[in-house]
Image: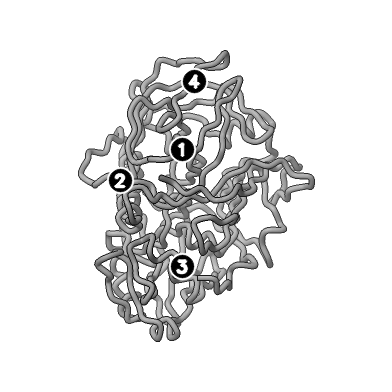
């Protein structure tokens, strides 16, 4: 089952659009929670994340080549590990569904757990819809319906209603907030048709002033932790410190079909990944880097691969010798401290680890650099830096937070 954390805060912006749209007070909130999937025992973080990375790369390549994406079952299906769950209302009167907030996909769908309930606002379009993720899949029928996010509503939002799904125990589906391009190929009979996302429709209906989603996470040390805020329409300046810096979306495929950026990574004074393209993704837990960069990181840290967890393992003395990991993004360096590079030690048992060791959250993406998707900055990166996904200006922003240098892990 999923262990659901206390409700987190998600703010919906209602201010006038600007280069960085700040959120006024009082705020309109959408509760959502951090969840840990404990169904079936320990969590297979690496297996989940590498399967997701492969699916993301394959889907982007398929879109770039103009092929309908229908991934076959060559990658093992693994359940979602750690997710951020929003309570989203669908229909009128609304049924509340627990949906994973995902920047790496763009379809919104329900029915994995709680069945979809047809109401007066439900319209069956007659279209078949399906999406395959590294962590599972769903297929079913497209409806349009009223979506409720806090006190705001979206009318005639496209949603998938699952008749079949796998890999999503304990949740009801996904709230997709990735780029619209990712919906291409998901309608079986209209593969070239793109589906407007929830964020797009909020903007189109005048509910938010700009097509922006901002994310604030905090490092976690337990399965029950209030640790985040999702902001639609702008940024919340109370959640970050210093300057909010932006970088344009990458033009390198397949990263360009997601929230893709260019960056380089250095461990101490050694560059382990020269400037290349990758993505920022709330659906990935770890920080994944190209195989050659990972091997160099492993060597420099003195870590060994742990067979029980799949993660890199170091001793306490090796942890004390860890150096900073530097992410250079559009000329700005973001420092991931040694504490930011390790899995929360209080959660070692949940990933099959031992209290005697320290585990690193940097791992192998599963391919060498040059694939067009050479890194994924996942949740463990986002817990240390405020992030802004700005469709209006085709850019992603980052800023330090009070938790950038936290030592809670």
Say if mark 4 contacts mark 2, CB within 8 Å.
no
- On the image, the x and y values in percent for residue 95 come to 55, 26
Q: Residue at x 34, y 21 (%)?
A: 189
First reached walking from the N terminus: tag 4 or tag 2: 2
**Image height of 150 relative to 76, above or below:** above
Q: CA distance from mark 2 to mark 1?
A: 20 Å
Q: Mark 4 or mark 3: which is in front?
A: 3
Tell me the tag on residue 117.
Answer: 4
- On the image, the x and y values in percent for residue 281 come to 46, 52
Tell me the tag on residue 346.
Answer: 3
Q: Mark 4 or mark 2: which is in front?
A: 4
First reached walking from the N terminus: tag 3 or tag 1: 1
User: Which residue lies most toward the right here?
Assistant: 25
First reached walking from the N terminus: tag 2 or tag 1: 2
Q: Secondary structure at mark 3?
A: helix
Q: CA distance from mark 4 to mark 2?
A: 33 Å
Q: Mark 2 or mark 1: which is in front?
A: 1
Q: Residue at x 49, y 74 (%)?
A: 339
Classify 10 Å Cα crowding around label 4: few (below 14), some (14-19), many (20 and above): some
Q: Residue at x 52, y 30 (%)?
A: 196
Q: Secondary structure at mark 2?
A: helix
Q: Secondary structure at mark 1?
A: strand
Q: CA distance from mark 4 to mark 1?
A: 16 Å
Tell me the tag on residue 174.
Answer: 1
Classify 10 Å Cα crowding around label 3: few (below 14), some (14-19), many (20 and above): some
Tell me the tag on residue 58.
Answer: 2
Left of 78 or right of it: where is 333?
right
């Amino acid at each position: 089952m999923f262990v659901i954390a206390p409700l987190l805060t998600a703010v919906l912006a209602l201010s006038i659009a600007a280069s960085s749209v700040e959120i006024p007070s009082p705020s309109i909130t959408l509760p959502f929670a951090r969840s840990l999937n404990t169904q079936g025992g320990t969590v297979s973080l690496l297996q989940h994340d590498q399967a997701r990375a492969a699916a993301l790369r394959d889907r982007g390549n398929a879109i770039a080549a103009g092929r309908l994406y229908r991934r076959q079952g060559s990658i093992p299906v693994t359940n979602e590990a750690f997710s951020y769950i929003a309570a989203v209302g669908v229909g009128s009167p609304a049924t509340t569904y627990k949906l994973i907030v995902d920047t790496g996909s763009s379809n919104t769908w329900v029915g994995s757990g709680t069945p979809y309930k047809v109401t007066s606002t439900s319209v069956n379009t007659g279209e078949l819809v399906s999406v395959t993720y590294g962590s599972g899949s769903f297929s079913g029928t497209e409806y349009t319906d009223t979506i409720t996010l806090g006190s705001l509503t979206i009318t005639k939002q496209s949603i998938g209603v699952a008749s079949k799904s796998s890999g999503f125990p304990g949740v009801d589906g996904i709230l997709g907030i990735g780029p619209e391009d990712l919906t291409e190929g998901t309608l079986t009979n209209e593969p070239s048709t793109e589906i407007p996302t929830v964020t797009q429709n909020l903007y189109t209906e005048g509910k938010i002033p700009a097509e922006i989603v901002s994310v604030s996470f905090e490092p976690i040390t337990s399965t029950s932790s209030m640790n985040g805020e999702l902001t639609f329409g702008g940024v919340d300046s109370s959640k970050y410190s210093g300057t909010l810096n932006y970088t344009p979306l990458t033009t390198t495929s397949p990263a360009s079909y997601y929230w893709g950026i260019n960056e380089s990574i250095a461990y101490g004074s050694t560059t382990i990944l020269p400037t290349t393209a990758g993505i920022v993704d709330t659906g990935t837990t770890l920080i994944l880097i190209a195989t050659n960069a990972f091997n160099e990181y492993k060597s420099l840290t003195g870590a060994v691969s742990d067979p029980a967890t799949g993660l890199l393992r170091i001793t306490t003395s090796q942890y004390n010798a860890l150096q900073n990991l530097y992410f250079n993004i559009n000329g700005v360096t973001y420092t991931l401290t040694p504490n930011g590079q390790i899995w929360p030690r209080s959660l070692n048992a949940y990933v099959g680890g031992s209290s005697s060791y320290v585990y690193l959250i940097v791992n192998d993406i599963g391919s060498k650099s040059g694939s067009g998707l050479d890194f994924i900055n996942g949740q463990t990166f986002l817990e240390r830096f405020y992030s802004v996904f700005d469709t209006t200006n085709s850019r992603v922003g980052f800023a330090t937070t009070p938790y950038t240098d936290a030592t809670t892990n």
